[in-house]
Image (tube, grey):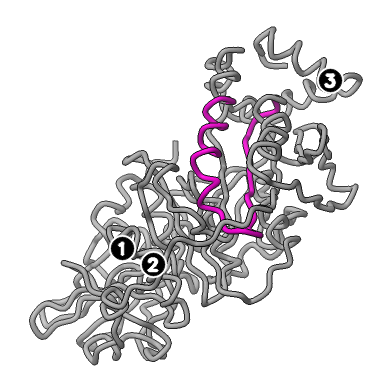
Amino acid sequence: MKNLPEDFVNRMKDQLGTEADDFFNAFSFPSPTSIRLNHRKGNSSFSDLQQVPWCTNGFYLESRPRFHLDPHWHGGAYYVQEASSMILDDVITQLNLDQTPRIWLDLCAAPGGKTGIIASHLNPTDILIANEVVPQRKTILWENLVKGGYMNTLLTSEQASSFRESLADIILIDAPCAGEGMMRKEPEAINQWTEGLVKSCSLLQKQIVKDAVNALKPEGYLIYSTCSYSLEENIYNISDFNESYDLESIQLNFPEKWGIQSINFKEAIGYQLYPHKVKGEGLFIAVLKNNSNRKSAIQGNKKLSNEFIAVPPGIESILNNPSSFRLRKNSEYNLLIFSSAEEKAIEVLQKWPRAEIIAQAGQIKGKDFIPAHFMAMSGIQHSEVKKIELDLEGSLDYLERSTMISSSVNEIGWHLASYEGTILGWLKYTPQGWKNHYPMNWRLRSRNTF
């Protein structure tokens, strides 16, 4: 067993009773490595892996590879994600949502793992707001969402209190926490743990929910999660939320063999994943339904709606089925959403005009259209755009932004760099040779294997 804080050990003994020894013994085993495949990018390379029981696209790896040397990772074919956190996939499935257009809000979204799970459940009529207030984490979130190719996703950087009343149909609050569930995986979580940290995190979580709950529409769902075990951060908080904000705990049903433990306190219901019961780290999750009758304060905006236009001819040639999209311009890029989601996009952008639409189509410079990296990642490009299939060495060269491309193709224009069917980004063939348009900030900087 790792050198765990004495107060934490005593807490867990009180909380788990006779199961405590099994819990502490789990710290002697290495943390499993798991990935979640991108539902938009089919890849057969992982078909023989053990599946994460509660996630359709989640799989365990036998060992942890050097992900930075795998072009599939750079191309967004999968996301490296802790298995327990993927329980969100099954939770959303259990909500059994119909096709009604919805606004989703991921309030504490970075680095984007759970955002990607939500995106896999979106209808074409839905809008997802991914919010992150920390600038550095927001940058990472942006990169992961672009590589994921997620349509109908807006990025904001707002305090929880700034979201207007009755905006979202579903809110995910993956709250900042004491990180107890990460102690086996991340030694820093052990070093930083104190009783005071648990108490301060519990207070912060209460404040975040207090600030955000007004953004939840009547009959909407609040999904709350932490990577902690403490009752103060989890089930006690859920009980407080129920009593303070006219929320109701929703019972979920997980197969007994999954090892997910139901936790109850008063009228509150939550679910805990422990490392001695599941193949994953520690996580708590609960779903609350809003029983209040507040009305939405957001109304339509004619001026803003006029800023969405049909896709112009300059972009049509590179976009598959352009009539399915609406376009909005900003100072640099043409931004896309599915036309079916225009109403919900307007509803959000009326309040937050600076919200960034992840789906960048590209830039028109003079007579030339320069496609954005998102267009390559999303799979919405025209099927006639040719793919340049690269081997592993050539793919790593491309990711380093090399222009030494080995291909028999010599057709002037835009092409897609591909590795085993995973699109990596754009190439352009010119009379002077190949031009590599992989984003400079995301280029592969080292091939070291240590």
Give the quarter of the figure containing the N terminus. top right
Q: Which mark is residue 20?
A: 3
Q: Which mark is residue 424?
A: 2
Q: Position of residue 156 (x, y in %)?
A: 37, 53
**In percent of the image, x 78 and y 38: which residue is there?**
268
Q: Are marks 2 and 1 in contact (CB under 8 Å)?
A: yes
Alpha carbons under labels 2 and 1: distance apart: 8 Å
Q: Are marks 3 and 1 in contact (CB under 8 Å)?
A: no
Left or right of residue 132, residue 45 in this image: right
The residue pinned by badge 1 equals 398
**In percent of the image, x 62 and y 25: which residue is there?**
183
Q: Residues within 10 Å of mark 2 (few under 14, many from 20)?
A: many
Q: Are marks 2 and 3 in contact (CB under 8 Å)?
A: no
Whichever of callouts 2 and 3 sits on the residue coming sooner in the sequence is 3
Whichever of callouts 2 and 1 sits on the residue coming sooner in the sequence is 1
Number of marks in the rendered image: 3
In the image, the segment drawn in magenta is 202-230
Dot in front, 2 or 3: 3
Splitting the image into 4 quarters, where does residue 27 fall?
top right
Splitting the image into 4 quarters, where does residue 137 fall?
top left
